Amino acid sequence: MDRSDVAVIVLGAGATRACSFVDPAEWSCLPPLNKDFFTQLQRVPDTKHQGLIKEVLKDVISLFGMNFFVTLEDVFSTLEHTIRMISVTGRERAYKKNDLMKMRARLMSAIAVVLEASLVERREGGRAAQTPRKCSHHEELVKRVLRPGDHIVSFNYDCVIDYALKERGEKKWNPRYGYGLPLGPRGARLIGHQHWAPGTPAGKGDTIHLHKLHGSLHFVIKRSDRVQLKQRPYTKQRGMSHFAIIPPESNKPYDKGVFATFWANAAQALGKAAYLIVIGYSLSPTDLHANALFRTSVRHEGLRSLVVVNPCQQDRARMRAAVQRGLSADTKILSFDTLQEFLATDVSVWR
C-alpha cells in the first residue's frame, strides 16, 4: 500500500458499548463506560463473582460514602493519591497502606468481571461461557475499512477488536508483529500469539498495527520479561486475575516498560496518519497523557480527513481541538453519531 495513505482508527470505550450484540433489553449488563462502571458492576449476574462485587462496593462506600456517584477513574485516582500520601507522611490513621493496595487489586479484578459479563456468551442461569460474542461492526471495520499497514490506537482493555482481527484479518493482521511487543532473540519473548492469528496471517511489513495504550486483559507480563497472550482474556480461574493494564489513574505509568513502547509506537502512527477516525473516545480533559499524545504527534496540516464518531458534541469538539495541528483548509472533517452510521458511509467519502 501507499505508506502516505495510512489510516489510524482510535477506539474508546464507546466503541465497545456500540457493539452489534449490545442490547439492554436482552441483557442489562453492558460494556462499561468510565462514568457508569459501578452501575454495570452491580448488574453482573454470575454468582461466582458476587463476593468480589460486594467487597468492591464496600471499598467504594468506605472512600466516598453510601450515596456515592463516582467514575472508575475517580476511585483509582483516589486510591493512587491516598497510597502516595501515606508513603510520604507515614500516617495510617484513616487507612492502612496495605488495605488500600488490596482495594486497588480488587478493583482491577472487577474490571475483568464486568467485561466478562458483558462480552462473552452466557450459559443458562446467566453464567459466563468461554466463547466471546462477535461484533459485526468491529468485523466490518477490519474487513472493509482497514487496509494492510493501517493502525489502530485503542484505549480499551477488552479484546473485541482483537477477536475481529482474528476472524476477519486474513492477510491483514499478524499478532506476532502487529502489537509491537518486544520479540527478543528468535521471538522467544512473545508466546501465545498463534491463537490470535487469522488463518492466513499478514507478512511482517503488511500487518495492521494495534497499539493498546492501556494494555489488555490478554496481556500477561512474565518475570522473565516475556509477554504471554492469553487465550481466555476475561476468565478468572482462581485468586485475582492476572493481566497487564494501566488503570485509569491520574498518574499513569505510560513511560515505563512495555507501555513506553506502546505509546512511542502510537505517536509514530499518528505522525504518519493521513486519515484519522476516532470512534467512541471522549478524550477526558483530565487525561493529560492522551491529550499530549494527540497534540504533539499528528503531522502539521497532515490530515486529509478527520472523522469523529461520537453522539456528544462536546467530545467531538474536544477531539478536533486536540488534533488541530494536523488540520488544514483542505482537511475533510466529518462527524457521525453512531458506529452504524459511519459504517453505512462509503469509505471513499473520507479516504
Image (spheres, helix red, strand yellow):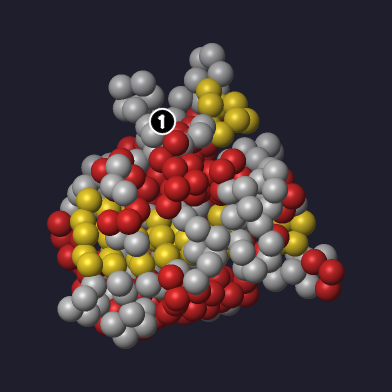
Res 340 seen here: yes
Q: Is residue 275 left or right of residue 130?
A: left
Q: Sort mark 1 into few (<14), some (14-19) or many (20+) by Cα contacts within 10 Å.
A: some
Does residue 65 lie above or below 301 as drawn? above
Tell me where residue 310 appears, x and y as whole percent. Answer: 25, 52
Tell me where residue 271 appears, x and y as whole percent. Answer: 43, 79
Image quadrant where residue 195 sits: top right
Seen from the viewer's position, the closer of residues 83 and 273 is 273
For the C terminus, the quadrant is bottom left
Tell me where residue 102 appears, x and y as whole percent. Answer: 55, 53
Q: Residue furthest left?
A: 313
Seen from the viewer's position, the closer of residues 194 and 172 is 172
Q: Amino acid at mark 1?
A: Phe
Instruction: Identify the residue shown where x is 80% and y is 66%.
Output: 187
Instruction: Identify the residue shown where x is 62% and y is 48%.
Output: 170
Tell me where residue 210 appears, x and y as whole percent. Answer: 54, 61
Instruction: Identify the residue shown where x is 59% and y is 26%.
Output: 129
Read off the residue under disc 1: 21
Q: Is residue 162 left or right of residue 144?
A: right
